[in-house]
Amino acid sequence: MLDAVAQIAGHVQRAQDAACLQRHAGMVIKGAREAVPEADDLLAVEAGFTAATLALGEQCG
């Protein structure tokens, strides 16, 4: 899901669309932090979240 957000970020033109994607990425990471017990798996999700957030920032920055 976070990979999809990062890819879609490259096509976002409106700030409200980027905000929506960021909100969804936030929901994914929140769920992972609550439910993923394996540290390595959680690190992978955290990396995906960081990549998605950076990609969104590039579009809105």
Image: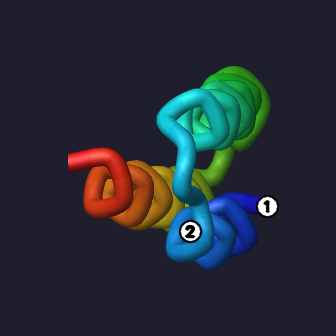
Q: What colour-coding does the image apply?
A: rainbow
Position above or below: 6 against 46: below
Along the viewing direction, whichever of 46 and 6 lies nearer the viewer: 6
Q: In the drawing, what numbered circle is on residue 23?
A: none
Along the viewing direction, whichever of 27 and 15 lies nearer the viewer: 15
Secondary structure at numbered mark 2: helix
Residue tagged by mark 1?
1
Q: Viewed as shown, does residue 22 lie left or right of 35? A: left
On the image, the x and y values in percent for residue 61 come to: 20, 48
Residue density around tag 2, few if under 14, some if 14–19, many if 20 or more, within 10 Å: many
Residue density around tag 1, few if under 14, some if 14–19, many if 20 or more, within 10 Å: few
Secondary structure at numbered mark 1: loop
Q: Viewed as shown, does residue 3 lie left or right of 6? A: right
Q: How many marks?
A: 2
Q: Residue at x 72, y 34 (%)?
A: 24
In the figure, residue 50 lies in which quadrant? bottom left
- In which quadrant is the N terminus drawn? bottom right
Residue 4 in view here: yes
Along the viewing direction, whichever of 16 and 57 lies nearer the viewer: 16
Q: Residue at x 49, y 52 (%)?
A: 49
Q: Check contact, mark 2 vs mark 1: CB within 8 A.
A: no
Q: Amino acid at mark 1?
A: Met
On the image, the x and y values in percent for residue 34 come to: 69, 22
Along the viewing direction, whichever of 33 and 58 lies nearer the viewer: 58
Identify the mark nearer the N-term, 2 or 1.
1
Q: Residue at x 54, y 56 (%)?
A: 13
Residue 40 in view here: no
Q: Amino acid at mark 2?
A: Ala
Q: Residue furthest front?
A: 13
Residue tagged by mark 2?
6
On the image, the x and y values in percent for residue 57 come to: 30, 50
